[in-house]
Amino acid sequence: MEIIVAVKQVPDLIEELEINEDGTGLDPDLLSFVLNEFDDHALEEALLLKEEVGGSVTVIGVDTTDELDQALYTAIAKGADRAVKLVGDFDEEGLSSHAMARLLADAIGGMSYDLILVGVQAADDLDGQVAPMLAAYLGLPHVGVVTGVQVQDGTATVHKEFWGGIMAELEVTLPAVLGIQAARQPPRYAPVSRVRQAMKSATIEEIEVDEVPQVPVAPVRRMFKPEATGRAEIIEGDEATIAERIVEILKERGVM
């Protein structure tokens, strides 16, 4: 069974995020990037299927950050068999979901596959549209918000979550595109030594993108940091001083 997993790098939300000078996006020079969490789950589900039914896993991504190699080598260290990245003159602000899906469809269309897994959404836009758009471009069935997949006789049994935690079990004829919300188990860890070994022994294939699809999108006019709506006061001193200050605060707020 040949499985393709589409991955994307997103800003590390643990780091402090800074808005660029014109206020239309994040400053890319001050960002560090990590693999999108949902794509990591898509990779884990693909590796589980490979272990169960055999076959190969190909990981593919559009390198908009010039930092995709780390994610691809890590995927190989975890068990992926092939890594492919699309390179080109991409806007530093990134690509829309439409453009991303179109580029992936053009590249994947020339590959052999039985199943395509994509993270249900990306942490940087929460758009959740790449998987269904990719399916539409390739003319394949799509199921989103998937939490588990079993494959047998050309059919995938898919566990899908609806609003309110309602679960459904669906059967989908392969090939298909699935938007993975969570793998059946937490994503496996790749030791640094194994990642370094992959960097020495594996080769990342490159596909040159000559023209980026121009797809009309709703532009971001302005981006703001959230306003601080509360603050904490640290009360120091001995027990009597702290108690006295607490009483003062309660009186100021009309509680006492």
Image: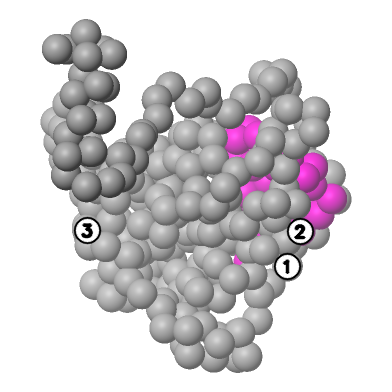
Residue 206: image tag: 1
**Residue lying at 35% horizontally and 35% vertically, measured from the top left:** 233
The residue carrying mark 2 is 87
Could you tell which of marks 3 and 2 lies nearer the N-terminus?
Answer: 2
**Residue lying at 23% horizontally and 38% vertically, measured from the top left:** 241
The x, y position of residue 232, in whole percent, is: 36, 34
Residue 255 against residue 52 in the figure, above or below: above
The residue carrying mark 3 is 184
Q: In the shown orientation, is residue 244 left or right of residue 212?
A: left
Amino acid type assigned to the residue bearing label 2 in the image: Val
Residue 27 against residue 207 in the figure, above or below: above
**Residue lying at 62% horizontally and 57% vertically, measured from the top left:** 32
Secondary-structure class at tag 2: strand
Q: In the shown orientation, is residue 155 left or right of residue 144?
A: left
Asked if marks 3 and 1 touch (Cβ < 8 Å), the reply is no
Give me the C-alpha separation between circle 3 and circle 2.
Answer: 32 Å
What is the magenta range?
Answer: 84-109
Residue 144: image tag: none
Residue 188 against residue 140 in the figure, above or below: below
